[in-house]
Image (cartoon, rainbow, N blue to C red):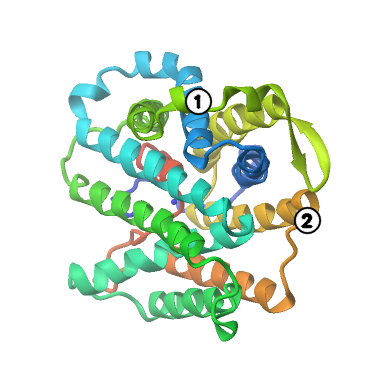
Amino acid sequence: MACHHVPVRTSDSSVSGRGGSVGLGLALLSAVAFGGSGVAAKPLIEAGLDPLHVVWLRVAGAALVMLPLAVRHRALLRRRPGLLAGFGLLAVAGVQACYFAALSRIPVGVALLIEYLAPALVLGWVRFVQKRPVTRAAAVGVVLAVGGLACVVEVWSGLGFDALGLLLALGAACCQVGYFVLSDQGSDAGDEAPDPLGVIAYGLLVGAAVLTVVARPWTMDWSVLGGTASMDGRPVAAVVLLAWIVLVATVVAYITGVVSVRRLSPQVAGVVACLEAVIATVLAWVLLGEHLSAPQIAGGVIVLVGAFIAQSSTPSKGSAQPVASGGPERELSRRGTSA
C-alpha cells in the first residue's frame, strides 16, 4: 500500500540478469499481495466486522508472525525510536485504518487510487511548506494525478461516491505524507540505515498496540470469523480471507517488496509499484463485481501516470534523489541498500 523521500543509497542500473528477473518477479508478487488486501477485507466488513476490527486483526496477526524479526533487531528500539513510532502510527495504523474504513463506503479501486495522491501531496509539502523548488515534470505529475482523480470520483456528477468514504481514503494518503515528512526529519542523522524488515516488524508491533486501544477488539463479534463471507454472491470461509490478509497481503507483501527493491532499479520498482492499484481494481471487478465506468478507468490510468511522474521526479536544486518514492516498505528497503 498502500506509500518516502529520505536520502537513499541504491544502484542506478536497470534490471539485468537472473537477479533482476527474480527481483521483478518478487515485485509483481508483492503488488498482487498488497492489491488483494482490500478485496479480502471488504467481504469481512460486509459480513459484520467493523473496519477497525479487520485492521486490528491484520496488523496484530502480522506483528505476531514478524515477532522473531523484531527480537532479532531489538537494537532499533534504542537507535531509531522516532522512526519506529512514525512507521507504526502513520504508515501502519493510520493508513490501514483509513483505507479499510474507506472500503466500507467506496469501491476498492477508487480508495486505492485516492491513496496514490500521496506523492503529489508530498510535492505540495516540499514546494509550499519547505519552500523548495520542484521540477516542471513533478508539477505536471501533480496536475495529472489530480485531474485523473477528478475522473475517478466523477466530479461532474457531484461526486459519484460517498463523501465520507472519499475523505477517509484521502486520510490514508495524508498519513503516508506524514510518514514522508517524519522520515525526512531524521534523514540527516548520519547513522547506519536500519534494516527495513526490522523497522516493518516494530512498525507492526507499534501499530497493533495503538489499534488495540482504538479498535477495542474485545468488543468484536468473533463469531463472524467462524462463518462465511460473500464475494459477489459466492460464499468464502471468513478465516480463509483473514489468513490471506495477514499472511499474504501483509507478511508476504512486505517481505517480497523489500527484497525486490534491493534487486531492481528505482525506476523499475516505481513502475511495478503502480501496478498495485491496477491489480486491486481488476481483482475487485472480478471477485466483488465492482465495475468502473470508462471515464473512471481512464482517470485511474491518468492518476497512476501522474503519481509515477511525481514520485520519480527530482528537486530542481540538483539533488539526485527522488522527492517521493513508493510505499513505506519500498522506501525503507532503498534506505538500507548499498548496491
Position of residue 150 in the picture relative to residue 310 (left or right): right
Position of residue 236 in the picture relative to residue 238 (left or right): right
Q: Which SS class for mark 2? A: loop
**Visible in this render: residue 223?**
yes
Position of residue 313 in the picture relative to residue 185 (left or right): right
Q: Nearer the viewer, residue 15 or 257?
A: 257
Residue in the picture at 68% in, 79% down: 295
Position of residue 172 in the picture relative to residue 228 (left or right): left
Residue in the picture at 61% in, 52% down: 276
Q: Which comes sooner in the sequence, label 1 or label 2?
A: 1
Extreme-bottom residue of the structure: 156
Q: Amino acid at mark 1?
A: Ala
Is the residue 70 above or below the residue 309 in the image?
A: above
Extreme-right residue of the structure: 234
Res 32 → quadrant:
top right
Across and down, in percent, residue 222 comes to 58, 23
Q: Nearer the viewer, residue 293 or 141?
A: 293
Residue in the picture at 71% in, 27% down: 240
**Visible in this render: residue 314?**
no
Res 242 → quadrant:
top right
Q: Which residue is mark 2?
A: 289
Gap in Å between the C-alphas at discs 1 and 2? 28 Å
Q: Which SS class for mark 1? A: helix
Q: Amino acid at mark 2?
A: Gly
Across and down, in percent, residue 138 comes to 40, 74
Across and down, in percent, residue 288 comes to 75, 51
